[in-house]
Structures are given as structure tokens and as C-alpha cells.
């Protein structure tokens, strides 16, 4: 007999790969996140700045504290961490460090042709999810297909994120998370358990150009 009183999971839209101005190559002010993600129709974001743990949150913001770590083998995202993980470790060592803090490890943009990416097939330590749709990937018809194949081969949860570096690309791809509450710990547990649906999307050519122009101005 089913328990009619049991609560059903709610569906939350999260962009699980977002950079702020705390990343050297990103231009979204941290304080603008609440307004931006609500405008984009999201319920929350994972803040994944390069080698910088974002544990400081803004009141009223549903944000997962995270970091995108530059391992010796490519980038690894850690969510739910309390302290930063140093760069330069192997991907396996990086995942172990994330797990030692009770966090989850996500492999972003695997098989990407133009960015430092971990090949999931070479890992000895199992991550918790694979980003199968990265909105900022070039030639995504190839990279997405390879990412999907990797996730299916090892039966890992599939997630999506914009890899946003400017305000205009936030939420270009996102993940629907089935979670009992929007509390970050509950959302992270749901991702680990595979209660997710990856929703694809791409960054436009004009948005890519905007980012390049901002980077060129920043170097001056």
C-alpha cells in the first residue's frame, strides 16, 4: 500500500556551472546573482569559480557552494565543500579530496576539444556525475555525444550547466533536480543519487564575442 501522506520531491532548476568575477576570466558580479538567476527562470545556481571556493552566500540566494579545480588531468567541479582543494593534484586525488569533505565531484565538459578536460574513462576513482551538456562547448555535436556515451558507460548521473562567464549566458543550460527541499545539502544529495534531468542549451555567437571583448578590455 502506498503512503499517501509521503511528500513527493519538488523540481528545481539549477545551473550547475556558473562563474562570477571571482574567476579571472569571468565578468558577472557576485552580488548580481539573485536578480540574474530569477530573471532567467532558475531556482538556483552552483557557483564554480576557478580554483576559488565560493562559500560566501547572499541572503535570499539558493546557491550551492562550489569550485572548479584545475587538476593535473583537467577540470573537476566540487560541490558542498567547506575548504578549497588545491590545484595540480591528479584528477583521482582531486575527487578523493572532494569526497573526504563530504562533497560531490562532477566532471565538467569531458572530451572538450579546446579546454582542459578529464577523460572519465581514465579515472580510477568514481566521480558523482558527468556534465553531459555544457552550453559553452564548441562543436557541441561531438563533445556532447562523447560526454553522454561516457556517462552511460559508467552509469553516472548526467547534469548540465551553462559554464557562464558573463551575465547574458546564465541558465543557457541547466539541470532539473528532484529534491524534497531547495536546501543546498538536499539538492546536492539528490544530484548524487541521480534524481536529475540535464537540459541542453548553447551560448550564441554574439555572447561568445561579448566575452572575448570583455577579456580583451580587461587585459589593457
Image: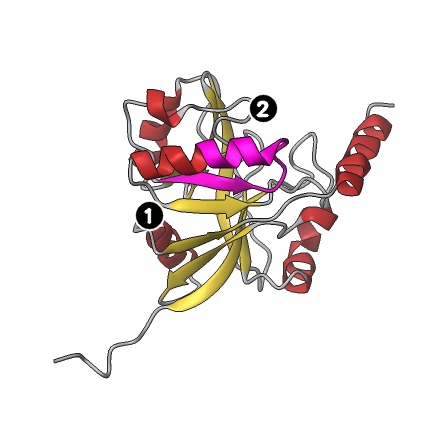
At horizontal 43% and vertical 55% (from top left) the residue drawn is 197
Q: Name the residue under label 1.
A: 192
- Compared across the picture, whether 5 is left or right of 94 comes to left
User: Looking at the picture, how far across and down is residue 41, in whole percent?
Assistant: 62, 64
User: Looking at the picture, how far across and down is residue 72, in whole percent?
Assistant: 46, 16
Q: Say if residue 29 shows up in the picture.
A: no
At horizontal 87% and vertical 23% (from top left) the residue drawn is 220
Nearest the viewer among 24 and 4 is 4
- Compared across the picture, whether 215 is left or right of 3 comes to right
Separation of residues labelled 2 and 1 (CA atoms): 25 Å
First to last magenta residue range: 129-146
* Tally of numbered discs: 2
Residue 140 colored magenta? yes
At horizontal 43% and vertical 56% (from top left) the residue drawn is 184
Nearest the viewer among 78 and 204 is 204
User: Looking at the picture, how far across and down is residue 26, in whole percent?
Assistant: 70, 36
Q: Say if residue 122 shows up in the picture.
A: yes
Q: First in sequence: mark 2 or mark 1?
A: 2
Q: Mark 2 points at which residue?
A: 115
Nearest the viewer among 168 and 60 is 168
Nearest the viewer among 121 and 52 is 121
Is label 1 in a helix, a strand or a loop? helix
Quadrant of the image occupied by residue 164: top right
Amino acid at each position: 500500500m502506498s503512503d499517501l501522506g509521503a511528500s513527493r520531491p519538488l523540481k528545481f532548476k539549477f545551473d550547475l556551472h556558473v562563474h562570477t568575477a571571482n574567476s579571472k576570466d569571468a565578468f558577472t558580479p557576485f552580488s548580481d546573482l539573485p536578480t540574474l538567476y530569477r530573471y532567467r527562470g532558475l531556482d538556483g545556481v552552483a557557483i564554480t569559480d576557478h580554483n576559488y571556493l565560493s562559500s560566501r552566500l547572499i541572503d535570499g540566494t539558493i546557491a550551492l557552494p562550489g569550485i572548479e579545480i584545475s587538476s593535473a588531468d583537467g577540470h573537476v567541479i566540487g560541490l558542498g565543500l567547506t575548504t578549497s582543494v588545491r590545484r595540480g593534484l591528479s584528477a583521482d586525488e582531486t575527487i578523493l579530496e572532494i569526497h573526504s569533505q563530504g562533497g560531490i565531484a562532477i566532471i565538467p565538459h569531458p572530451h572538450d576539444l579546446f579546454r582542459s578536460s578529464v577523460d572519465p574513462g581514465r579515472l580510477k576513482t568514481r566521480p558523482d556525475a558527468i556534465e553531459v551538456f555544457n552550453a559553452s562547448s564548441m562543436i557541441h555535436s561531438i563533445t556532447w555525444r562523447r560526454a553522454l556515451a561516457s556517462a552511460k558507460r559508467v552509469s553516472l548521473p548526467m547534469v548540465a550547466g551553462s559554464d557562464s562567464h558573463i551575465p547574458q549566458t546564465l541558465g543557457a543550460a541547466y539541470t532539473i533536480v528532484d529534491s524534497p527541499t531547495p536546501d543546498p545539502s538536499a539538492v546536492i544529495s539528490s544530484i548524487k543519487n541521480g534524481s536529475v534531468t540535464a537540459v541542453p542549451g548553447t551560448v550564441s555567437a554574439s555572447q561568445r564575442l561579448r566575452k572575448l571583448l570583455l577579456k580583451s578590455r580587461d587585459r589593457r
